[in-house]
Amino acid sequence: MLLRLDFQTDVAPRLVFLKQLGVEDWAGLPDQPQPFHPHKEPGESAGNNLSFYIRVAYLGSKKFSAESVASMVSRAPYLLNFSVKRMDNRLGFYQQQLGLSAQKTHNVMVRLPRLLCGSLEPVYQNLKVLNAKYLRIKERHLFLQYLDKAQYDPAKPNYISLDKLVSLPDEAFCTEVAAATLKDFELFQKTM
């Protein structure tokens, strides 16, 4: 596809726009530089630069700063290939399904822009995990690690579903998932 594009009409305007947006200068986290790679963005069609700008303007209308948009595009270049309607639907999904305020949704998307690009199915299937308290997940995960039972890949033996990790009461979690006693789990919690 890149060979069919005319540099002056198709590529140069987008690169100039990205540079003005600040994508070129964004270096990501101090210990993990993540520069923008134009070849990662597959582009929709040869003369459709206007839709490219409209998508950035849409993000701006949702109160994302230019720096935030540059950061998001740097870490999830495919984001600018999504239609405005699709981006809006995905932002709405996260806000409604997770019960987040507009500001919290905004903060999550700036930190993890690939959530807008990926499949919503795994997110929908694991809503309990995303809504669970972090401390509960951390304690249980570390306890399973301590027991060498933290295995969350469904393709491997001794799979532990994320749903069971967060939704079971402590006693059921200990007996069904960790194969330990509640007293062992409580002692482990005291060491944290």
Image (cartoon, rainbow, N blue to C red):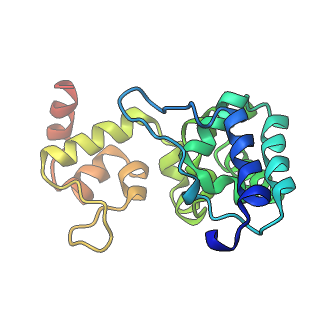
Residue at 64 percent across and 45 percent down: it is 98
Q: Position of residue 80 (x, y in %)?
A: 71, 53
- State which quadrant residue 101 falls in: top right
Q: Nearer the viewer, residue 4 or 88?
A: 4
- Residue 143: image location, x then y, percent: 20, 42
Q: Quadrant of residue 185?
A: top left
Apparent side of residue 124 relative to residue 147 in the rendered image (left or right): right
Which residue occupies the foreground of this view, 187 or 105? 105
Residue 6 location (% of width, % of height): 74, 65
71 and 151: which is toward the camera: 71
Q: Please report the residue visible at 62 percent of the width from the left and 37 percent of the height from the top.
A: 23
Please tell me how many numbered marks the rendered image carries.
0
As displayed, is residue 133 above or below residue 180? above
- Residue 171 horizontal side relative to residue 126, left or right: left
Position of residue 141 relative to residue 31, above or below, is: below
Residue 106 showing in the rendered view: no
**Residue 59, above or below 8:** above
Quadrant into which the C terminus falls:
top left
Q: Residue drawn 12% across and 49% down?
A: 147
Residue 168, x across and y down, in percent: 39, 52
